[in-house]
Image (cartoon, rainbow, N blue to C red):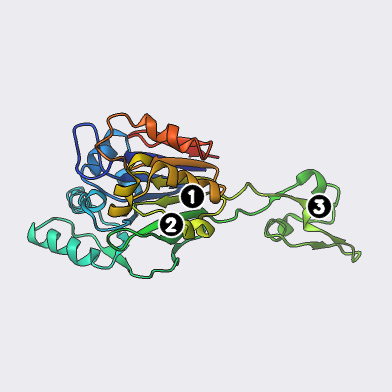
Amino acid sequence: MINLTILGCHSATPRVNAFPTSQYLEINNNHFLIDCGEGTQRQMRKYKVGFSKINHIFISHLHGDHFYGLVGLLSTYGMLSREKEMHIFGPKGIKKATLQMLKISESHANFSMVFHELSSKESELIYEDDRVSVRTIPLTHRVYTNGYLFTEKEKPRKLNMLNISGYPEIDKADYLNIKAGRDVTLPSGEVILNTELTIDPPKTLSYAFCSDTSYKPSIVPIIKNVDLLYHEATFLNDRQDLAKKTKHSTSIEAAKIAKEATVGQLVIGHYSGRYPDTSMFQKEAETVFENVSLAKPGVIFTVK
């Protein structure tokens, strides 16, 4: 299951009711923080995100509205006497910038921080455990930027106990091998196919986070068929010239990416402050792609 909590979803500077980019992702019992703009830890408390559950932070790029909340959050972890190590993924330079600030401020963040600095312009596997894998999505912005693709690992097949009960020769000791996909050979020599003894596991789910970027169709093969896609849409189509100049995307362009990638659901955000009514972003995107939602602080998107 995927639960995506939007903590902040606006561009540029924080405002009274507009927080820059940050998201909390729960996927297959893993807990990740994605980007960390100013005010992230305040939003985490407001929306009851468990600080202690997060052991991995993914930063897309080193612009302030995606990164400036990180030092404050790590400092707070220090004051909370955190002991478990924190893994931080982000562009080359993130380690120096973060540790220098913590050192100058004489922070109490004495727990281990493991930095994974990124520089490749090709998609690469950067994290993997027995439940989830994470790949980069190379984007095109004014500075080096990556999105991230989070994918559940395939779960074991489920035992079809009704069919298994028809073969008294099958012992419980065989169950693990059966769940792993192996056929069973009976004492008589008869081979029982695994598909007869098991049920397909639940579909693996995936989430793609595409932060600040120009319109980039080349990412489509990387995010093909994802269940949930967040793609920035800083401008409406009337300011396509400004989107191109600042290397951002429009709502129409985000929808085109979603359509070409045949994703399940598109969430758009990173709205420019020039638009007091964000509903127009959804209306424009829906002229290209049907299943569009707006990112809003506190909203949780669930995929089962």
Query: Which secondary structure, mark 1?
Result: helix
Q: Which mark is residue 196?
A: 3
Give the residue at x 31% y 60%.
88
Give the mark toward the camera: 3 or 1.
1
Q: Which mark is residue 257?
A: 1
- Residue 40 visible in the snapshot: yes
Give 35 or 216, whichever is nearer the viewer: 216
Mark 2 and mark 1 lie on one chain; the one further toward the N terminus is 2
Where is residue 235 shown, x and y percent of the image? 33, 42
Give, as a three-letter code, the residue at label 2: Lys
Mark 2 and mark 3 residues within 8 Å of each other at the beta carbon = no
- Give left or right: position of 268 versus 59: right
Query: Which secondary structure, mark 3?
Result: helix
Q: Residues within 10 Å of mark 3 (few under 14, many from 20)?
A: few
| Residue 46, placed above or below residue 166 | above
- Give left or right: position of 141 versus 257: left
- Give left or right: position of 91 versus 25: left
